[in-house]
Image (cartoon, rainbow, N blue to C red):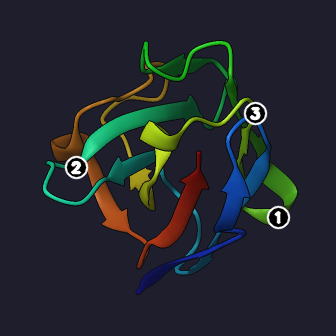
């Protein structure tokens, strides 16, 4: 059984920074990619960023490009999301996900991910 455990959420003022981490445990890691999604109150879950596990290439939603950075530590089976220049509209529950459908691409659709974390709250005050 695969488990994804997120940490690092919290409350921050607009313009500030937060870092999230997600550790993959359980069954031997075999995912092609890991990523982050978020869901704000009253809105659908949306893609934030993802990283290909083998090559390290990344893909970002336009809304976070230039402000957020996704990275991985393969030795620790952990993915990170560094969030800078945070805005109130970044407020959401952030979910870590693992999956992918090929060893070279970077997925961005929820259907391409097989495992999900429990979510961690990020609140940005104005």
Measured along the vertical axis of the image, is residue 45 above or below residue 48?
Answer: below
Residues marked 1 and 2 touching at CB (< 8 Å) = no
Give the labeled residue for mark 3.
84
Query: How far, Cα to Cα, is label 2 from label 3?
Result: 21 Å
Closer to us: mark 3 or mark 1?
A: 3
On the image, the x and y values in percent for residue 80 come to 72, 50
Tell me the tag on residue 76.
1
Q: Callout 2: few (<14), some (14-19), or many (20+) C-alpha neighbours within 10 Å?
A: some
Q: Secondary structure at mark 2?
A: loop
Q: Secondary structure at mark 1?
A: helix
Mark toward the start of the polypeptide (1 vs 2): 2
Query: From this viewpoint, is residue 78 visible?
Result: no
Frontmost residue, 58 versus 68: 68
Image quadrant where residue 98 sits: bottom left
Residue at image position (67%, 41%) is: 14
Residue at image position (57%, 35%) is: 87
Residue at image position (48%, 51%) is: 31
Query: How far, Cα to Cα, is label 3 from label 1?
Result: 23 Å
Image quadrant where residue 93 sits: bottom left
Q: Callout 3: few (<14), some (14-19), or many (20+) C-alpha neighbours within 10 Å?
A: some
Residue at image position (56%, 30%) is: 52
Q: Callout 1: few (<14), some (14-19), or many (20+) C-alpha neighbours within 10 Å?
A: few
Give the labeled residue for mark 2.
45
Residues marked 2 and 3 touching at CB (< 8 Å) = no
Frontmost residue, 44 versus 109: 44
Query: In the drawing, does residue 79 fall left or right of residue 112?
Result: right
Look at the image and tell me in which quarter the C terminus lies.
top right
On the image, the x and y values in percent for residue 94 come to 46, 58
Q: Residue furthest front?
A: 126
On the image, the x and y values in percent for residue 21 come to 71, 62
């Amino acid at each position: 059984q695969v488990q994804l455990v997120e940490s690092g959420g919290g409350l921050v003022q607009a313009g500030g920074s937060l870092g999230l981490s997600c550790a993959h445990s359980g069954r031997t890691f075999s995912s092609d990619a890991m990523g982050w999604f978020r869901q704000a109150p009253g809105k659908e879950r949306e893609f934030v960023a993802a990283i290909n596990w083998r090559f390290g290439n990344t893909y970002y939603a336009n809304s976070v490009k230039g402000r957020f950075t996704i990275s991985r530590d393969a030795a620790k089976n952990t993915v990170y999301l560094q969030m800078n220049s945070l805005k109130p509209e970044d407020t959401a529950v952030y979910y870590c996900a693992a999956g992918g459908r090929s060893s070279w691409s970077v997925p961005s659709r929820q259907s391409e991910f097989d495992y999900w974390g429990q979510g961690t709250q990020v609140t940005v005050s104005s």
